[in-house]
Each structure stands twice: as structure tokens, then as C-alpha cells.
Image (cartoon, rainbow, N blue to C red):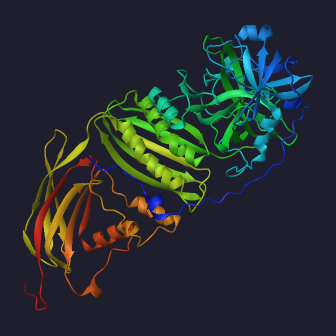
Amino acid sequence: MKKPVLLTLLILTFNLVFCVSLLYAGPFIPVSDVMSVNAIKPGMKGYAVTVIEGTETVRFPVEVISTVPQKSKPGKLILIRAGGPVIEKTGGIASGMSGSPVYIAGKLVGAIGYGWNFSEHDLGLVTPIEEMASIWEWPEDPPGFPVPVDITPVSKDQKDEGKNITSQDLGSNILFEGASADIRSLPVYASGISNRAAENIGKVLDEKVVNSIIPVNDDIPVEYNARLKPGEAVGVLMAWGDVSMGATGTLTSVSRDGRFVAFAHPFLNRGNVAFPLTRSWIHSVIPSVRSPFKLGTPLAIVGSVTQDRPQGIGGRIGKFLPAIDVSLKLEDTEFSRSSRKRFHIASDPFLVSKIFPELLIGVIDDLWGRKGEGTFRVDLEIEGGTLTEGWTTSNYFFSDKDIASVAAEDLKSIVDTVSLNPFRKINPFGFYINIQATSEPKVLYIEKLKVDKKKIKAGEELKIEVTLRPYRKKQITKEFTLSVPEKAFGPCEVLVRGGGISPMEQESIYQGLNTISSFNELLEELNAREANNEVIIELVYNEKPGNDQNIDNNEDKLLSEVKESRMKEGTLRIFKSNYYVEGLLRKNVTVIPVSEDGNS
């Protein structure tokens, strides 16, 4: 079995230091008057504002039962009981009401943040507004530049806070609002990927991910000059397009400088983030014994979420951050079918590192219509940002169990290396992936190795004959020639193997003799990786003792330089096939040194 492609270049060569420019925005001051949690008394009555259908906000009455102290943030929560016709219709406080502002005597107290499953759903906990406002005591660290990227303007008819928009106008780009409010985050909802991918992403994020059976439409438009009001339904997106992933809650408050707070609990609790904020359409609230939940669809991107803290989320309306573009085309060569998905991922390199391979697996499962064994040829292009000329690579993969996972893991290692590189910020940038897929084992086996001589003089050429067999097909024979260097001496070895089997390593980096010092060098070393479709033929030799000054020492060279040097001297040959190459064979030969008079 081949050694997995683990790109440890970052770990081996870099002491990773990230320079950030932190922006302190100042205190968050809601437009409306506020009431401190210290002024809250049991029996006080007020109302909450939310959306239960469409985009129109409605009110329902609430009564304070008690103030609940907390040892963690938020430091205090307010226990309330909700009632009235709205709550009777919804079956209680629903998941998706998170962030619904609560007012007493016309003053903002906080927002609904928590409830309980399998309980009386009219009971809930409110996060005080001063706790939510405190998220802005943290600095912002937005990536890139504040302009929209790859977006479609929203139509004039859609700008007026969703008026004249019906559910039929929304297509089928559905994000559900969750089924549990007794945790400190909303469930993440995904669409456009397989169920196993959603389950695996949930494990990676340590969050509940619910996969929707409803397909996803094209890109969500952008509303440039949005004006939001407290109580409106809003959403946070991690991915959008043909693949969608996010959660929906409620806007709590805005300030005069365009900042907002919402949700009244964290989304993923990642601190500084760069997620799109959306205006959402609520189809309905679905009653449930477990917990009522809203069924919602994002209407348009209206801003950015830059804070994701225990007390809530916050960000800026009308500010748009760059995103990562992903396009994946899958060609099923068995059935001559081709399909594509294109989507965006929020600009968070570390988050992308975690969810990117699982998203790819989910998309491949969905496009291919199956999972399991198979052979892939994968072509990857990365471009954008400061990577002006782009970078491409190609590789073959085979698995008798789960080909999508094998290919995705290799792609993840490349994406990690490029996106987390310490030399250049590539933002925004895109990944363009083309996969030729077949369930057949397109495997090329190395069966025989012959050399024309057992003993050979230094400076001569050695003829190699390699017998290869495609899976269940006739053998084919290939001939190669290796040069025996003048400096070679004694017992040597001819080695024929599939690319990636006992590959040449970055020895100079492992031994601390060299390092990668630029982004271009990093790309060169990525290019030097062996591909799984290669037949590697090499002469591994001992060097003649003495005359050290004449020896071309490779010890301090990077892998790309070593390969170039060995190709030039003729001790390395690479044959590229259209198969995944499997196998390793060796033959021993003896190099006879040549004396100065030319005799052996």
C-alpha cells in the first residue's frame, strides 16, 4: 500500500507566525434605549420580536421569571415565559428565534438565546444586551478587503426588506433553522452534499450538522445597501452556491455605525471570523415535541459576521469580505456523463482545512451517485489573489474501498500547504478541480525487472527492461537506460517502483541542512512530489571513496534540486502512465571502478 501523501513542508521548514492587524471598533451602542440586567425583576412583562413567516416581524408577550447567574460567559441569563397567539401557533419558543430582541417598558433587555428540548417550550433564557454588546470589546481581524467578491446584485424588487417576495421566488436554496436550542450554538444545516459528509463535518466541528434533502440553487445575490431592523431573520453562511452550509437566527440590535449583534449565543465560537450575513425568508415554524424549529431560506447577503463569541455574533451590515471559490467537475468515464458544482467557502484558512476534504467527499458522492472503490484522475488548479499565474497539479488515485476519501485527503494536504503558507496571503483565491472517475481499477502493476548486466563499469550505461501489466490485460514491456556515474562504486541497486512508494524525501529539510524560504520555492517543492501514475526507475549507488572535491553532494539540496540533478546525470528516469502504478522491484548490480589508465 502506498505511503499517504503528507505534506509536512510547513511543519518542517516554517516557524509559523501570523501577523494580524487588529481593529478596535469601540463600544457597541444600540440605537434603541436599553435596560440593564441589574434592573430586571421577577414579574416584569414585555415582548419579544421575531419572524415566523416571510420577512414580517411579529411580537409576542414575555414575563420575567428569574435572573440566573452563570460562572461562564454570559455572566447572567434571564429566565422568561412566552405566551400569546404567536407562541400558541409555533408550539413554543422555536430554534431560529435565537437573537429575538426582548423589550420591557420599551427598552431593549436582551435577546432569546436558549431553550430546552422535550420541555415546556414556552420557557426560555434571554442573554442580556450588555453581555451581547461586550463581544465588541474584542478587536476585529477581517481578512482581505471590504468589497463584494463574485456576487450578483439583488434586484430592486427585493431590496425593500423582502416585500413582494414569496417562497416560490426563492427556488430551493433551503437552510433549516435548528431543532435544538438547549445548546450554546445553532445546528449547522447543509445541502448539496452526501449524508456521510454532513456527519463527518459535524464531528470535525463538534457541532450537529443536519443535511437537507432539498437541493441548492445558484449564488445568493448581494444587497449592497441593506437596512435591517431588530427581530428580522438573518443567517450565517460557511458555504453557499451549489453547496450550502450555515445556520439561521434573529437580529437583535444595530448601532449607528452599521454594526450589529445577533443570535444571543455563539455560532461556532471561533472568535474572529469572516462569514457572510444573510437576510432570510422564513417559510414557517414547524411544531415539534422535541423542539419547534423554523424553516428558512437565505434571501441575500447583506453584510459580514466578524465576531463569533459566547455571548452572540456580531459584524457589519453593508461590508463584504472575500471568499474562496471552489469548482468541481466530475466526468464519469464509464457512462460518459459530466456534471459540475460550484460554491464558495468563507475565508477562514483553518476552518477550510477542517471542512474542505469532507465537502469534497460530499460533492463527489452527490455528483458520482455512488461511493466505494474506483480510480480517479484529479487535476487541480489554484489561482487568485497574489497567485496571479495560477498553479496546477495532476495525480491519480485508486482505492478498493473509498476512492473519494483517498483523493480528498491528498487535495486537503495541498490546500493546507498553499492556504496556510507563511509567505503570501492569497485572498481571495479559488480551487478548480476536474475529476475523471471510473469504478474500474485502472491499475498498472510492475511485474518484472531485468538488467542487461550484473557487473558494469563506472561511466557505462545500463539497459533496463520493465514488464508492466494493466489490470486483467496483456503485459507490456518498456525499456529504459540508466547512466552509471564515474563516482559510483561497488554494490548498487536498480529500483523500479510506483510513484509514491518509498518516495524520495526532503532529506535536507529533515536533517536541518536547508529550508524553504519563499512561496515560489514552496510551489517548486509541491511540483517535485511524485505522482501515483509514474513509474520511477532509479540507480541507487555508493560513491567512490576519496576525491570528495569532485562529488556533487546532494545532502543540502531540496527535493526538486535533487531530482533535477539525478535526471541530468541519468540515474533517475520517470515514465508517466495513464494508470495508478502499483509495485516495487529491485535488482543488485556491481559497479567496477575504472582506473586512471582506463582498465577495470
Residue 341: image location, x then y, percent: 51, 35
Q: Quadrant of residue 470?
A: top left
Q: Residue furthest bottom?
A: 597
72 up-or-down from 95: above or below? below
Residue 566: image location, x then y, percent: 29, 70
Instruction: Say left or right for 292 vs 468.
Output: right
Residue 337: image location, x then y, percent: 39, 31
Toward the viewer: 582 or 5? 5
Residue 558: image location, x then y, percent: 39, 69
Q: State whether residue 316 appears in this view.
A: no
153 up-or-down from 553: above or below? above
Which quarter shows the C terminus?
bottom left
Q: Quadrant of residue 230?
A: top right
The residue lying at 79 percent from left, 41 percent from top is 134
The residue lying at 60 percent from left, 27 percent from top is 187
Toward the viewer: 9 or 584? 9
